[in-house]
Image (cartoon, helix red, strand yellow):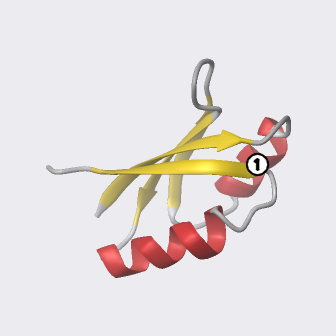
Amino acid sequence: MIAYLLISLGGSGEIEVLDRLTDLDEVVEAHILFGEWDLIAKVEIDSSEHMGRFVMEKIRSLPQIKITSTLIAAK
């Protein structure tokens, strides 16, 4: 399963969060964005159950993160 995570921070810290994202095995690539969202991460995981746990435990638990949106690739 492939998904794209859009991430908005509560303030600054894009570089620190980017570094933490790229350290995660599930994150294939990650980038800082300009605009409404601060970062985007491409994630590969074996099931939707694992995706939910990954987002809640490894992404949303980071103190800088305000909101996320998970876009699961259909094809």
Q: Residue furthest left?
A: 75
In the image, what residue occupies the spot 61% across and 37% down? 39
Q: Which residue shows up at 51% across the image and 65% down it? A: 26
Which quadrant holds residue 43? Answer: bottom left
Q: Position of residue 17 (x, y in %)?
A: 76, 48
**Left or right: where 41 falls relative to 71:** right
Residue at image point 52% right, 73% down: 54
Q: Badge 1 is on which residue? A: 17
Residue 68 vs residue 32, the one in the foreground: 68
Mark 1 belongs to which amino acid? Val
Residue drawn at the location 57% of the way across and 71% of the way down:
56
Q: Is residue 64 left or right of residue 58?
A: right
Callout 1: 10 Å neighbours few (<14), some, many (20+)? many
Going by the image, does 65 lie left or right of 54? Answer: right
Vertical placement of 40 versus 47: above or below? above
Q: Quadrant of the N terminus?
A: bottom left
Q: Quadrant of residue 18?
A: top right
Is disc 1 placed on a helix, strand or loop?
helix
Residue 9 drawn above or below residue 35: below
Q: How many marks?
A: 1
Q: Is residue 49 left or right of residue 29?
A: left
> Horizontal and vertical percent for residue 20?
75, 56
Q: Position of residue 46 (x, y in %)?
A: 32, 75
Taking 50 as reference, is 65 above or below it? above
User: Residue 11 location in percent, x, y?
Assistant: 83, 36
